[in-house]
Image: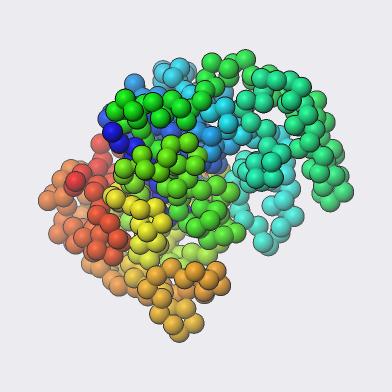
């Protein structure tokens, strides 16, 4: 039975949380496979609004077992803070499973994230400052601390000392900061160990068995295709694989057990942080989309950059992820527009590119070539079937479907859980 992956097709904040939550009633497990508390998923259930950062959004659905996979970096303080906050609102969090192989984010990762950004000056990435990059760097450098290390104090101490070796040198000599004491970090981590113990598991084995038992497993991607460390707009990316391949490596479930890949794509585009963004708007239409779509970061509150829909980006996401279905979100945000431009290709210094250029400088120079579509000037938030949508809205969706390389199976028409038009 199926493994389903949900990924972002653009630069994040496409509404993945809502899509996960929508599928929730049919699924048994929701697995977060990449990133950490840099994610921000807003889910509206009835009159309640939930903002999740580290926990998978499937935690909001009764009966679902939420899993934090080995590919995630876990800030334990944030984990318990989120669990307590959800518990206080009556959400059952008792089923959470955390991979013994997931890495932890410590105080020194957060410090390094912030000082590195400051040091980079104009070349800043615009990270969320949550310690994500430094934690993954340690993982790749083989000096990371894993959840399982919390259960052997000697090993933990040795590993923390090893991880601090070079870092303290850097902090003192380059960044002019005080050195961090290993004891401080060890005590901090050990303080969570016993509370965490019942949740720690061989999650790869549990998921494998669940799939053998015909359970439905949903893999929830954080961030998005264009922020993927391999396939995104490097170096303006996050430090993990946010694409569907990451669902396999970040969970221990083999790629051939993932049957469907659903990419969430917004009816326009947004981006937080620095980096190229060909369709970015700096005029009143940008302000209009930001205000109407409420485009402010769920984690940091930062204003999101906004622009028109970019079809080459969607096609690229379709290819890289093996997208079987798109969910098009926030179509309602375009309700008040007379015409809607869509980027169909790029002009790079006089040369037409129909697909994403592989060369970074080309993408930095890419100017969008637009095709214009008539708007519908009508409130669509009450529509619940494709036929109920105004003709121009239907045509817009069909045009995007044709350009974007996979079918559009559902359309978001408002922030609420039920504000969706399902086509397939
Ligand atoms: P990091 O902190 O190392 O992952 O930052 C590296 C880049 O990745 C971007 N990034 C994001 N982009 C969009 N949404 C994200 N989550 C939050 C949200 C963001 C927020 O859902 O709103 O609240 O600001 C997210 N997380 C990371 C980041 O902007 C950098 O460009
Ligand atoms: P994620 O990071 O992909 O989970 O997305 P975020 O939660 O950061 O941002 C998406 C925002 O759009 C959230 O505030 C959602 O409540 C909202 N949203 C999702 N789908 C729709 C939709 O179809 N219409 C409108 N107006 N808002 C939506
Ligand atoms: Mg988000």
Q: Position of residue 381 (x, y in %)?
A: 24, 45
Q: Residue furthest right?
A: 173
Above or below residue 329? Residue 110 is above
Can residue 410 be seen here? The reply is: yes
Q: Residue furthest left?
A: 387
Figure colour scheme: rainbow
Q: Position of residue 408 (x, y in %)?
A: 25, 53
Q: Residue at x 39, y 52 (%)?
A: 321
Q: How many marks?
A: 0
Above or below residue 181? Residue 87 is above
Q: Residue at x 24, y 48 (%)?
A: 409
Q: Residue at x 85, y 39 (%)?
A: 178
Above or below residue 8? Residue 25 is above
Q: Quarter-wise, where is residue 309 in the image? A: bottom left
Can residue 58 be seen here? The reply is: no
Nearest the viewer among 39 and 376 is 39
Q: Image quadrant for the N terminus?
A: top left
Q: Position of residue 161 (x, y in %)?
A: 80, 33
Nearest the viewer among 19 and 396 is 19
Nearest the viewer among 376 and 29 is 29
Q: Position of residue 280 (x, y in %)?
A: 46, 65
Q: In the shown orientation, is residue 77 left or right of residue 205? A: right
Nearest the viewer among 410 and 357 is 357
Q: Residue at x 40, y 43 (%)?
A: 255
């Amino acid at each position: 039975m199926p493994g389903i992956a949900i990924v972002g097709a653009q630069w994040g904040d496409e509404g993945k949380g809502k899509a996960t939550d929508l599928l929730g009633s049919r699924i048994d497990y929701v697995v977060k496979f990449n990133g950490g508390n840099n994610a921000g998923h807003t889910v509206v259930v009835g009159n309640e609004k939930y903002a999740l950062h580290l926990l998978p959004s499937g935690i909001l659905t009764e009966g679902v077992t939420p899993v934090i996979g080995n590919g995630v970096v876990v800030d334990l303080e944030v984990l318990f803070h989120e669990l307590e906050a959800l518990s206080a609102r009556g959400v059952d969090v008792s089923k959470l499973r955390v991979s013994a192989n997931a890495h932890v984010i410590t105080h020194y990762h957060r410090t390094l994230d912030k000082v590195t950004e400051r040091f980079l000056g104009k070349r800043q990435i615009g990270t969320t400052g949550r310690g994500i990059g430094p934690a993954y760097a340690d993982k790749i450098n083989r000096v990371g601390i894993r959840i399982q290390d919390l259960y052997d104090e000697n090993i933990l101490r040795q590993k923390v000392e090893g991880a601090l070796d070079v870092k303290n040198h850097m902090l003192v000599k380059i960044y002019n900061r005080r050195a961090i004491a290993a004891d401080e970090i060890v005590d901090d981590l050990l303080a969570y160990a016993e509370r965490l113990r019942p949740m720690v598991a061989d999650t790869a084995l549990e998921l494998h068995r669940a799939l053998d038992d015909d359970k439905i497993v949903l893999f929830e991607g954080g961030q998005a295709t264009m922020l993927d460390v391999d396939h995104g707009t490097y170096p303006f990316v996050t430090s993990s694989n946010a694409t569907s391949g990451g669902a396999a490596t970040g969970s221990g479930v083999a790629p051939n057990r993932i049957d469907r890949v659903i990419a969430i794509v917004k009816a326009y585009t947004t981006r937080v942080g620095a980096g190229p963004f060909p369709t970015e708007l700096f005029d009143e239409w940008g302000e209009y989309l930001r205000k109407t779509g409420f485009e402010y970061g769920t984690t940091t509150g930062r204003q999101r950059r906004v622009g028109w829909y970019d079809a080459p980006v969607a096609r690229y996401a379709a290819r890289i992820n093996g997208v079987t279905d798109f969910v098009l979100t926030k179509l309602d945000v375009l309700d008040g527009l007379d015409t809607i431009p869509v980027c169909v290709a790029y002009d790079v210094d006089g040369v037409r590119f129909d697909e994403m250029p592989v060369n970074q400088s080309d993408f930095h120079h890419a100017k969008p070539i637009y095709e214009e579509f008539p708007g519908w000037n009508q409130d669509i938030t009450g529509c619940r079937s494709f036929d109920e949508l105004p003709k121009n809205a239907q045509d817009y969706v069909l045009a995007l479907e044709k350009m974007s390389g996979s079918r559009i199976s559902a359309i978001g028409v408002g922030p609420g859980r039920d504000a969706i038009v399902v086509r397939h």
